[in-house]
Image (cartoon, grey):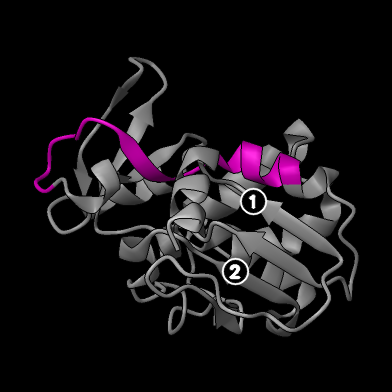
Amino acid sequence: MTPQRPAHTELGRFLLASGVLAREWAEPFDATPRACFLPDLMWPLDPDTGRHLSVDRRTDPGEWERWAATDTAITTQWDDGTHTGPTPGTVPTSSSSMPSVVTSMLGHADIRPGTRVLEVGTGTGWNAALLSARLGSGNVVTVEVDPVLAGMDPPGPGKGVRTPSTSSSRNGRWLSIARPFGQTRSSLAASLVCRRTTST
């Protein structure tokens, strides 16, 4: 059962009314709260100040939930995972994009029931879970080149949301994926992909 998150439902209504959430994606969006794919410690971008805030669910769950359901980008990793501590690091290296950007991209893609999708750049896993909610887990494969992110347990399973049946990456090396795909989607830094693929 999908966790009840009223703030996420309100965000979905706002995005739908704004025209950036297509109607065919409304149900998958409502069934897949972004909060299920965010770490306890995260750094949302405050749109009013342009600065990253440090928000920890363990110390302020209410504020954490509020930012998780806000239409803003949230950094989830700094400096390729070498940064520690609650303060922002130097370079954001993984994030959850603005929900309006995510839903707009999905809406503009020609994704229909039965389409098989290969996603390059798993990140938090939220986008792949949205695809799975609409297409079915067996039609979505997501790969991650960042060894730190690839080694993390996906946060979605066990929280009432659908996730891809396969997440393929080990130590930055691509795994063989023997199936045809109707679409390939990516959201990542091209320089990172080039550096990792040319070194393997």
- Membership of 92 in magenta stretch: yes
Mark 1 Cα within 10 Å, few/some/many (few <14, many 20+)? few
Q: Which residue shows up at 76% across the image and 67% down it?
A: 117
Instruction: Kindly tell me whether residue 8 is visible in this rendering.
Output: yes
Q: For marks 1 and 2, give the CA distance.
A: 9 Å
Q: Nearer the viewer, residue 50 or 192?
A: 192
Question: Does residue 101 sit above or below 170 in this rendering?
Answer: above
- Which residue position holds label 2? 142
SS at badge 1:
strand
On the image, the x and y values in percent for residue 95 come to 42, 45
Residue 102: where, in percent of width, then height?
64, 45
Q: Nearer the viewer, residue 82 or 4?
A: 82
Question: Residue 98, located in which quarter of the rendered image?
Answer: top right
Of the 4 image quadrants, the one containing the N terminus is: bottom right
Q: How many marks?
A: 2
Residue 186 disc label:
1
**Residue at horizontal 74 percent and vertical 84 percent from the top:** 178
Looking at the rendering, the stretch of residues picked out in magenta corresponds to 84-105
Of residue 145 and residue 94, the one placed in the foreground of this image is: 145
What secondary structure is found at the residue carrying circle 2?
A: strand
